[in-house]
Amino acid sequence: MLETKLRRTAALMTATWALAVGGQSFAQEGPVKVGFAADLTGACAALAEDGLNGAKLAAAEINAAGGILGRPVELIVRDTMTKPDEGAKVARALITDEKIDVLTGVCSSAVMLAESAVSGELKVPFYAAIGSTQRANIELYQPYFWQVQANATMEAYAAAEYVAKKPEWKNISALGSDYEWGHTSVAAFTERLKTLRPDIEFAEPIYAKVGETAMAPYITATLAQSPDAVFAPLFGPSLGAVLKQGPGFGFFQRTNLVTLMTVDTLQSQGAAMPKDNVYGISRAPFFALEQTPAVTGFVDAYRTEFKEYPTDWAISAYDGLKFYAAAADKAGSVDPEAIMTAVGEVTYDGLREAGLKVRALDGQMNAPVYVGKATKVEGYDFPILTEVEKFEGAPLMPSEDFILEARKAAK
């Protein structure tokens, strides 16, 4: 089944590439190869597939406009199965066998760290558009890496800023995924909120294994802490299970949930979304972006091609490939050293906002974070976020002194 899926994906990518380059006259060096090492099966499958869709549209647009430096973009897709060891193996094969120019596609933070290690070893540029642990930018940073979305710490900081504005919330619990992203997010959220609201009391964090769907024990344990709000860095099946199983325990009558609430989660819940007390952290909700011609054109193109609205992952991956193209254009080359210099210098006007750029010190983009209330509104057959507050990326980024101290402590 996996081989069939990958053959189908490869065939689709070949067809997409051929369609995009039809009628174009390109340079003779051959394509710019983008290795898309994605978690197409496992807990991250849905997110990775949306990211791939966004990258396909970006590649088609770049090729229709003449490619990168006159060369067509070719996406070479491989599945990591959401396993760090497989991710490292796939990344190495893409670099050594396929001779890719840049690596991307990863969702899982653990897989991202494994791929980043290979990227650093083999000195091939690698950018993340979904996976978001700050360890890749700080403690385990290597100079061929950058990420084009807010990292986990920045998102947790935005959540803390939002919660701090709720004076009636005085007792806070945390329910997270038991891996890199969940632990990092809880720690950063707690640290920031303690500074903003010294009056808040924090319960002992509770963690569920990645992909867990039997969430009743975790829900009851969390409610036993009598929280006013629960910060929950969960995603995929685990988050869906909390939203569906929580009402049976009176979860949303007894507390408020603050969690990752991207467009795919909103779509999957539909009418089943609890009516009250769900607040979402989002990276690129299409309905909350400034409705520029670029944004509306992308949404229309995505809906035409994939028969659904674009998710945060699709928009981030689209911006990611477009940013790489902008860096290559500035560098005048896809040579790794030239690309990495340009990555720290170029400014890109993306779907999320104008003026996106990457800080050279840690490879972090100043991408914004959005927080709002999940609400059913007319015109959509799924809930969206309303009363959205946009948190600019730069103020959420850890300071340079913090980064240097963290790197020193990690040695």
Image (tube, rainbow, N blue to C red):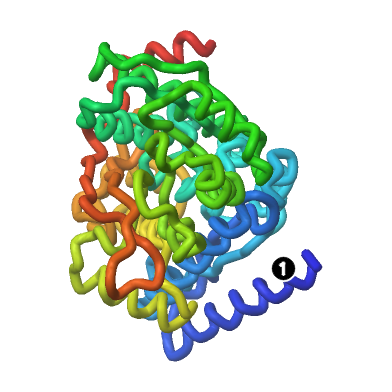
Residue at 26% across / 34% down in the picture? 162
Q: How crowded is mark 1: few (under 14 residues within 10 Å), some or many (20 or more)?
A: some
Above or below, 8 against 366 in this view is below
Above or below for 134 versus 225: below
Figure quadrant of residue 76: bottom right
**For residue 340, what is the image quadrant?**
top left
Q: Where is residue 169 in the image (x, y as percent from the top left)?
A: 29, 27
The percent coordinates of residue 18 (x first, y second) are 54, 83
Q: In percent of the image, x 33 and y 42: which residue is there?
A: 365
Judging depth in this view, the residue of 170 and 163 nearest the camera is 170
Is residue 294 among what the camera can see? yes
Instruction: Return the residue found at the far bottom.
Output: 23
Residue 164 lies in what quarter of the image? top left
- Asked if residue 332 shows in the view, the reply is no
Whole-percent x, y for residue 234 in the image: 52, 40
Tell me: residue 93, above or below residue 361: below
Asked if 67 appears above or below 88 in the picture, the reply is: below
What residue would you read off at disc 1?
A: 6
